[in-house]
Image (spheres, grey):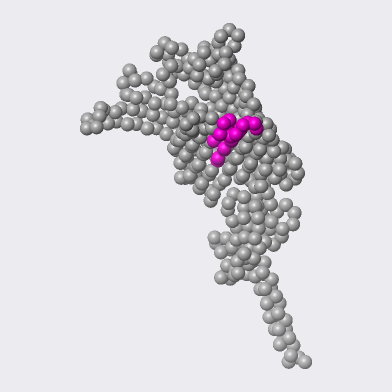
Amino acid sequence: MKKNTPKIFFSIQYLLLFTFLFTAGNALAQRDEIFKKDSTTIRCKVLNAKGKTYTYTFIDKNNSVTKAKVAKTLVDSVQYNKYDSNLITHKLFDEQLQDIAEEAPPKAWVFIFGIGLNVGNILEFNSSSGPDKKSFSATSALDLGLNYYKEGKRFSMTNELHWTVAVQKSGLTSAAHIQRATDDFSTLHDFSYAMNKSNKWNFNLIAKTSTSIFTIFDGDFFKDYNNNGKIQGFINPYDVTLSPGIKFQPNDYFRLSLSPYSINLYGLRSQQIANTGFYTQTFDTNGDYDLFVFKQLGAELNIWYDRKYKKWLDMQYRLGISSDYFTRLAKNGLMDGLFITKIKLIKNVYLSHRAILKADFTQKPFKPYYNQTVLLSFAKSF
């Protein structure tokens, strides 16, 4: 009996060691994958999915087994047993598990700031194809955002401000005056109240406003060199569109809003600018151009797409199409789009492409307005 005791003892040791290795290997295997909402993934072994967090283990860059947690609000989906084999190719069990801080859930309020600049200069002397060319141009853009969303709450909102201003000068002498090329100031707002806790279906109100900032005179100059007076200014004109309706939002980056009825408020504050005839086509009792026009736009469809890919590509697209119920789209329809694409160069520095697309389907021949700008920009979220 005593001779068999060491064998039994060692057998129990081997059994315990095998059980430990099997359990540890199962816990530390990396066959699962967590897909986060910021388009990043984590290959790991999910240990616990209860509550508001996922607890998992993974092998870090130092080949250490690390235990971590991630809030479910940051996770898009989890795929279990995605991989057929583990990544365990070294002595894992000599490493000590390291507890790291839990990833904090996203903030309810997010402020977004972005500014861009593009400067161009053309100097051409003694060209065989024509006269000398001397010109200067500059474009700047400002993007602000203030968004609110809190997990478990039904109310959310998106507020955006976009301002693009561009100037040009046809020559480098004092006789060549600086001219306005672009002065577009617009805001976009989406106020939503979810029908249920999933937040996929919402009652919402989309509001759009647009105007210009600088006072512009005849010839697109910033001063009245032609003595013909002002032709544009702040809130001269202004454009406001209100579109209440229903929004479908299946995920964090795609929003589709359908408004059965939308209205447009268009007007000016200056009678002098209104009387240029560029903006309104009807007259008041005094024979002056009207300062205010109310339009019923009928149904409106808005598609908003916000997506970040691999932390280097940022897409922000806005497209709206409106039409009267009682006429075909080709006879009474409007389209308005803003498309911003940013490619990350270094931290907070991007190469930005901005495109504005507007169209009136009643125009014959059909000639949509398109404007694009490429800028070097700085952007940061707080």
Q: The N terminus lies in which quarter of the figure?
A: bottom right
Residue at figure coordinates x 65%, y 60% from the top left: 79
Residue at figure coordinates x 60%, y 58% from the top left: 42
- Viewer-proximal residue among 67 and 1: 67
Q: Is residue 327 magenta?
A: yes
Q: Is 241 above or below relative to 64?
A: above
Start and end of the magenta stretch? 316-337
Residue 206: in sight, yes or no? no
Quadrant position of residue 112:
top right
Q: Is 107 above or below relative to 164?
A: below
- Viewer-proximal residue among 85 and 252: 252
Q: Is residue 321 magenta?
A: yes
Image mark count: 0
Residue at figure coordinates x 67%, y 31% from the top left: 261
In the rendered image, residue 96, in percent from the top left (x then y), is placed at 63, 64
- Viewer-proximal residue among 110 and 280: 280
Residue 282: in sight, yes or no? yes
Quadrant position of residue 190:
top right
In the rendered image, residue 55, in percent from the top left (x then y), is placed at 68, 58
In the rendered image, residue 210, in percent from the top left (x then y), is placed at 56, 26
Asked whether, in this view, residue 63 is left or right of residue 122, the answer is: right
Residue at figure coordinates x 30%, y 27% from the top left: 134
Q: Is 349 above or below relative to 175?
A: below
Q: The C terminus lies in which quarter of the figure?
A: top right
